[in-house]
Image (spheres, grey):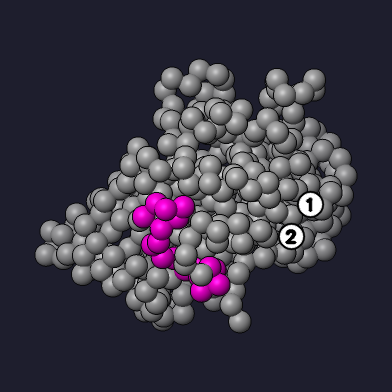
Amino acid sequence: MVFLNRICVFPCKYSKAKIFAPISLQFRKFSDEHHTAIKTPLYDLHTKYSGKLVNFVGFLLPVQYADLSVTASHLFTRKSASIFDVSHMLQTNVRGKDCVTWFESLCPVDLRGMANGSSSLTVFLTDQGGIIDDLIVTKVNDETLYIVSNAGRLDVDKAHMIDTSDKLRQQGKDVTVEFWDVSERALIAIQGPKAASLFQSLTDFPLTDLTFMSSRVCAVAGVEGCRVTRCGYTGEDGVEVSIPAEQANHVTEALLESTEIKLAGLAVRDSLRLEAGLCLYGNDIDETVTPVEANLTWLISKRRRGEANFPGADIILRQIKEGVGKRRVGIRMESGAPARKDAILKNANTLEVVGKITSGCPSPSLGGNVAMGYVAESLKKSGTPLLVNIRGQDHPCIVSKLPFVASNYYIKK
């Protein structure tokens, strides 16, 4: 997604003070003028629960709710469970006997080797190895794929998928790409250690059989045709649920009948993902960065490395073998103001500029501040002392191992 990293100050009717929300977000219009933004199927529910709505990449979404501060909501997610409206994400269905061949021509994933019903994080790549977008693909079967990609890259991703599939069809191949409009389909994420147990009460399908990065279609709260994928963007266990738009409020309200689950907004989603060391498109990754530089080499599957037939393969494989000049790392600061996007990183001994911050915020779970950024390859080791320049002053920080907070994904052993 395309984002601006900043501390956002919201004049808040819910308290006497202003709320300082540590978020890395892009707002087309940071104001109450929402007439150009698209309402998600959960718009009425957000209004009902006093969500503070903003225009986020062209969609009206809640940055937070009235009942909890950003910090309290973040911590509640880590100990219990929260619901996030992610209906703005692009949901794509691909069909045809050549859909796997088509998709592997865009990404370095071993889709052919994946089991039916399994999902994988992957990236669309340029011919220079840059990251067009990060996305999750589900292999429903050999002739059906389900893809969720970023709202901030919606137009770019649509054009990329349409153009490439059109070219294959002109060669006589069988592949059809169809996009769900937000008016047709909602998407919610239920995240937190209690997410699975709370969600289980709404479906007959045993969630113990649905491991991390697997997916299936089932009934949820009596609504048929929901796709449930065990994944998320917080580092916690949970599911993302694709729901027919007209039933989105019903399913969400059914979840909210429990006091152990609450609604959460964009600000919390951002601080959770940063603690989990997860990349944000437009901040931590973009078309100028390769997966190797982004510390995402694991996305290049073994078979695809051997075949060397994905976009930018010559550059990426050379980087894997010979190394790179910069690398994405975690950054920790125990006190002071948080480091924000584009803050300069310096060598603590020589004061030489060695990199920059790409995302940063206070860490409710750990205290102090966390950030991610790129540094010279020689300085990537955890514990390396650096300086970060914040508002013209250098402050001490250290390179830190990612993720900052241990992940709690459900992996059946």
Contact check, label 1 and label 2, Cβ < 8 Å = yes
SS class of the residue under badge 2? Answer: loop
How many residues crowd around disc 2 within 10 Å: few (fewer than 14), some, or many (20 or more)?
Answer: some
Quadrant of the image for the C terminus? bottom right
Q: Nearer the viewer, residue 122 or 240?
A: 240
How many residues crowd around disc 1 within 10 Å: few (fewer than 14), some, or many (20 or more)?
Answer: some
Q: Is 73 displayed left or right of 298 in the figure?
A: right
- Is residue 222 one of those drawn in magenta? yes
Q: Earlier in the sequence, mark 1 or mark 2?
A: 1
| Residue 405 tag number | 2
Q: Nearer the viewer, residue 284 or 409?
A: 409
Q: Nearer the viewer, residue 1 or 191?
A: 191
- Residue drawn at point x = 21 percent, y = 57 percent: 176
Image coordinates of residue 393 in percent, x first then y, are 84, 36
Q: Is 388 displayed left or right of 315 in the figure?
A: right
Q: Which residue is mark 1?
A: 365
Q: Amino acid at mark 2?
A: Val
Q: Amino acid at mark 1?
A: Ser
- Is residue 148 one of those drawn in magenta? no
Specify whether residue 351 is in view.
no
Label 1, label 2: how many angstroms apart (C-alpha)?
Answer: 8 Å
Image coordinates of residue 389 in percent, x first then y, are 78, 40
Image coordinates of residue 367 in percent, x first then y, are 84, 49
| Residue 265 tag number | none
- Residue drawn at point x = 53 percent, y = 68 percent: 207
* Residue located farthest toward the top when viewing the structure as drawn: 33
Q: Which residues are magenta?
A: 207-224
- Residue drawn at point x = 62 percent, y = 66 percent: 409
- Residue drawn at point x = 48 percent, y = 30 percent: 44
Q: Is 133 displayed left or right of 195 in the figure?
A: left
